Image: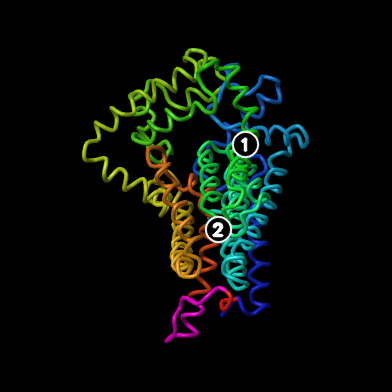
Amino acid sequence: MLFKHTWAFLLLVILGVLFRLGFVLAADSRQLTFHSGGSDAPVYALLAENLLLHKGFTYAGQPSAFRPPGYPSLLAGFMEVFGHHYITAVRVLQFIVGLLTVVTCATIARRIFGREGQRATLVFGLYLPTLIFSTAQLMTECVSTFLTALFLLFLVEQQERGDGRSACGLGLIAGLESLMRFNAAILPFFALGAVIGGRRKGSVVLRSAAVMLLAALVVLPWMIRNASVFPGHVLYATHTGANAVQGVVNTEGRTQPGDTEKLKAAMGWCVQDLETNDSARLALPSETDLNRHALRVVPQLWREQGWNAVPLLAKKIADFWLSTDQFLHTQSLPATERAIRIAGVSLYWIVVAVAMGGLHHLRKTRPDLAAWVILYLVGITLVHLPFVMNTRLRIPLVEPLIIVLAGGGWVRLDYLIRHRHQDPDLPVAVAE
């Protein structure tokens, strides 16, 4: 089919790269986001500015562990080197990182689905709207998605070889991504499962220790800092309570009209009150006190939902997996922007449908690996279920796997068309 023709494949790749580059260059160099209805980018920039001014990881001089330190530290470095041009410099970096993400995913697809799967994944990755969108936003998604792609590459290698190198890679990448996004803290446990459940059983203890030790060592400086500024109260994050409250009251994490009032009624404050250098921040208690109070009110909020909790959870899953948050609750955006999002979500649905075919193909050709893919997808969903669920939370942890599976789905679709009366679940060696 299409990707078998080298000229057509190269044309698609070149156009995809140029389109991504055009999207990044079209962004206003003075704006932190592009085609976004609002985001956390100003907060990351504020933390970076505070770091540069030697105020530490603080808001209004108050220590914070509400955001992970990785991305603000990256921004601070770019501010120091590039000055007022740091936004453009970060976008150029993320353009390159975005391409590396797609290439890494294509490498995984080559190992699993052969050369045609590799080509298909490369094209799907270049054109997937969510991956394109993240390159122009000064937020954690783009870099974190690349780290997840590397994590999945090491996970496949660990499943196949059970070697020490991939085990160390899993631990290192899991630790780094945990400093970029707090919800990535689940990755070391998936890595541990990959080691224990891999094909090779020799040196399982050593490889398991390498995974957990390296992940812990990467995060350790952040934990030591938190133990110092929040003595005995927090080691990793103070974000859990607010996120859990939003998971009931404001499930998309996007502040719609009336949501601020609901959050203040539920926990007495909202995130905007916390993430500011304004002197009003000094009127709030410490983040540890705010976090504990928010966690205490969560059970009551769920009890108040009663049977409405069932459709609420269904909505959260739909927002997370189907991106319904991107077009059902964006009334505040201009009509043109809403049309762009609907088109992007529609294209994402097509890629997901192809990816489902790839997962079916993988279950027939590599059932051991397919079991881990299913476990990963289910685990990621369950971990997020009590908290905010939206497209942006899905992108870093799931999108790389989607385009890898879409490559396998394309291989299967190609085989079905060419061999209508034969078994579509051919071995990978034949697919190549």
The image quarter containing residue 68 is top right
Image x and y of residue 255, in percent: 42, 36
State which region is magenta.
Answer: 413-428
Image x and y of residue 57, in percent: 62, 24
From the viewer's perspective, is 73 left or right of 272?
right
Q: Nearer the viewer, mark 2 or mark 1?
A: 2
From the viewer's perspective, is 395 left or right of 30?
left
Q: Secondary structure at mark 1?
A: helix
First reached walking from the N terminus: tag 2 or tag 1: 2
Q: Residues within 10 Å of mark 1 (few under 14, many from 20)?
A: some
In the rendered image, residue 353 lying in the magenta stretch gets the answer no
- Of the residues shown, which amino acid type is indicated by label 1? Leu
User: Which one is nearer the viewer's eye here, 410 or 370?
Assistant: 370
- Label 2, on which residue? 199
- Label 1, on which residue? 213
Give the answer, above or below, for where 127 lies relative to 337.
Answer: below
Colour convention: rainbow
Image x and y of residue 256, in percent: 39, 37
Judged from this view, the residue extending furthest toward the front is 202
